[in-house]
Amino acid sequence: MSTSPVYFKKRDFLNGQVNFPLCLAPMVGLSHVALRRLVKSYMPAEAKTIWPTEMLNSRKVPFEDLRLTPETMRHSSETELIPQILGNEERPIKESIIRLQDEWGAEGIDINMGCPVQKALKHNYGVSLMGDSDYAARVVEMAARWSKGPVSVKLRAVDNSNESLEKLTKFVQGLKQSGASWVCLHPRTAEQKRRGQADWAQIKWLKQTISGPVIGNGDIQTAEDVYQMIDETDCDLVMSGRALAARPWMMWQIAEDLGLSNPEGRVGKAPRTPEEEGAEYGRALLQLVDYCEEAFPPSLALRKIRFYIRTTHVWLLFGHSLIGISSLAQDLDQLRRSVTEFFLVEQPMRAKTSLRQ
């Protein structure tokens, strides 16, 4: 691929600190401190991007111990943190933001307006806010009033009619007028959830019809997908979820493509072939076990690893066997031994898989 500076440049996020084209998505059960550390370990020192948390309920954050709550645990080395909150009332939003930025170190706040699960819809959270543009704008205004850093919003796509696309533009313009610094669009509708193909054309539409940064999200499984999305949509930053969790060395591949230095402690070339990537999955999994053990109580660490394997095993040709291995493990040491033994045999990795699982 071309090493065009369009991919490695100062981006209009966090006062130009961000210079890398890819970031991790906020994912329930996955975007915790251990996974963030794992993904970041594949980035060179000169590369900067934004980092999410799992989705945080603004009604709970004011009363939680942010140091011990699994969703808000953070490592002392972490920077560029932008936690994602779910909420629609000013008092809990205010109290959550104040705690997250003053006690925890948040450098910005992301508002979830894309979650389609019933629990969020029932309380007029998540994607339900997209049904009321005035109220959604007020939620952004509430957050911007109390946030010292930028406020962003993660959205879902609309249907492809001209009327809906124009409403999407007006909706986002209202958010920006209320204080949103940027938006992230996952171009699947709430009804689609994980089904169907992400409609990147809606990212392009949004980029062409509003001012300010747009993050593109959806169907990013390889480094080539990152470049393709930027080329096709002109988005300012690309976000990847489960695929980046499964393939954290995508960060290394991109850095290598752009002529950047190797991540600290990593020598040679980034893994590229199915066999090299499969072997790297095994090494990354063992590293994640170490990070989970450091962050969480033993039983929770084991559950976190099991959930990670259930989510990411589909990229391995024989990954289903890993689920059985993790289920049988009684503790982390046994899990390490079983994982190490499993990857003594070559385990090729798919470039892409269905994202419906």
Image (cartoon, rainbow, N blue to C red):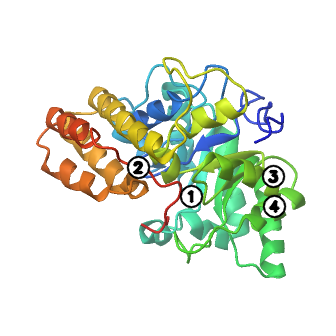
Q: Amino acid at mark 4?
A: Lys
Q: Which residue is mark 3?
A: 231
Question: Does residue 305 appear to the left or right of 337 in the view shown?
Answer: right
User: Where does the N terminus fall, quadrant-wise?
Assistant: top right
Pointers 1 and 4 in contact (CB under 8 A)?
Answer: no
Label 1 vs 3, first from the N-terminus: 1
CA separation, marks 2 and 4? 35 Å
Q: Amino acid at mark 1?
A: Asn
The residue nearer to you, when weighing 58 against 299, is: 299
**Callout 3, which amino acid?**
Asp
The CA distance from mark 1 to mark 2 is: 45 Å
* Residues at marks 3 and 2, CA–CA distance in whole angstroms: 29 Å
Residue 138: x, y in percent? 69, 57
Q: Which badge, 1 or 2, comes first in the chain's sequence?
A: 1
Q: Earlier in the sequence, mark 4 or mark 3?
A: 4
Identify the residue shown where x is 74% and y is 36%.
Answer: 13
Q: Which mark is residue 88?
A: 1
- Which circle, 1 or 3, is nearer the viewer? 3
SS under mark 4: helix
Residue at the disc numbered 4: 204
Q: Residue at x 14, y 36 (%)?
A: 334
Q: Can you tell which quarter of the image residue 15 is in?
A: top right
Nearest to the observer: residue 236 or residue 285 = 285
| Pointer 1 local density, CA inside 10 Å: few below 14, some 14–19, many at least 20 | many
| Pair 1/4: label in front | 4
Label 2: which residue?
348
Q: Nearer the viewer, mark 4 or mark 3?
A: 3
Mark 4 neighbour class, 10 Å CA radius: few under 14, some 14 to 19, many 20 or more: some
Vertical position of residue 162 compared to residue 7: above or below: below
